[in-house]
Amino acid sequence: MSSDSEMAIFGEAAPYLRKSEKERIEAQNKPFDAKTSVFVVHPKESFVKGTIQSKESGKVTVKTEGGETLTVKEDQIFSMNPPKYDKIEDMAMMTHLHEPAVLYNLKERYAAWMIYTYSGLFCVTVNPYKWLPVYNPEVVLAYRGKKRQEAPPHIFSISDNAYQFMLTDRENQSILITGESGAGKTVNTKRVIQYFATIAASGEKKKEEQSGKMDIWAFIFILLLTVFPEFHSSFACGGISLVVFVW
């Protein structure tokens, strides 16, 4: 996990990408009882946090954080992850992976305007419906050449990894961007274009990238001519293709 000083490379976007050291330390030291801390099904709010008070005859009595007392079936409570997992960047790393844990994590990250979250091989994006500084030029450059685990979740990381794998492994790559109307497919596709446009215009002279530079611009041109939201386009680098799908 990057320190605050290491996150400085992301500029003003840093607090929107990763928890601060202070917040991580506070979470690790927060009291937690793994045996009684649970999520419980709620009639109005889907799931809420609570503490088990008692168990009897297949029923569990839970006191919620809001002060309510609920008695539910045992299959309506779900173990809670320790506080150190709050706002976790890759939900596949959770001790307890279930619907309420996923929803809670996405909610907490969204409340902090951390709109990108990994879930195994996938990158989940929640549309903020506002401008955030997470696409600034310094952010693009900060992700360049970094392995997925070396940087916070972001569409730039997905783009960079696909590009680097295409160059080094000489294998075809694809990026699938999918979601409901208004989920942010078009915006994230534009960010993929932004990433490739930036590296194409970069002054760095890496041999393996020179042969593909003109192809990158051709790819960007194809994307700009494409009508959203249903399309697929690709560019080739020495016979190897990277395809972007929006569905």
Image (tube, rainbow, N blue to C red):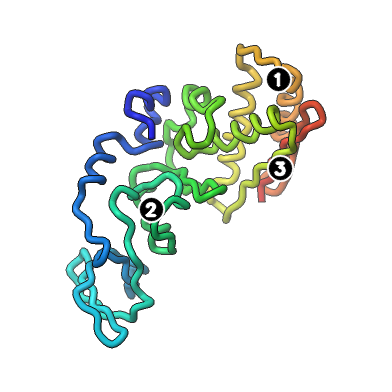
Residue found at the very far right of the displayed protein: 239
Q: Look at 34% across and 78% down and name the residue there.
A: 74
- Numbered tag placed on residue 105 in the rendering: 2
Question: What distance separates the C-alpha of mark 1 from that of mark 2?
Answer: 39 Å
Position above or below: 215 against 32: above
Name the quadrant containing residue 152. top left
Q: Amino acid at mark 1?
A: Glu
Name the residue carrying label 1. Answer: 208
Q: Position of residue 220 (x, y in %)?
A: 70, 29
Q: Disc 3 residue type?
A: Val
Q: Secondary structure at mark 2?
A: helix
Q: Nearer the viewer, residue 156 or 221?
A: 156
At x 52% / y 36%, what residue is drawn? 148
Q: Measured from the top left, where is residue 97 in percent x and y?
A: 43, 60
Nearest to the eye among marks 1 and 2: give it. 1
Task: Check the image and report above or below for 23 versus 202.
Answer: below
Place of residue 233 in the rendered image (x, y in percent of width and height, measured from the top left):
74, 39
Label 3, secondary structure: give it.
loop
- Residue 102 appears left or right of 217: left
Q: Are marks 2 and 3 in contact (CB under 8 Å)?
A: no
Q: Is residue 172 left or right of residue 107?
A: right
Residue annotated with mark 3: 227
Q: In which quadrant of the rendered view does residue 198 lie?
A: top right
Q: Residue furthest bottom?
A: 57
First in sequence, mark 2 or 3: give its number: 2
- Residue at (39, 60) in percent of width and height: 96
Quadrant location, the N terminus: top left
The x, y position of residue 33, in whole percent, is 22, 60
How packed is label 1: few (under 14 Cα within 10 Å), some, or many (20 or more)? few
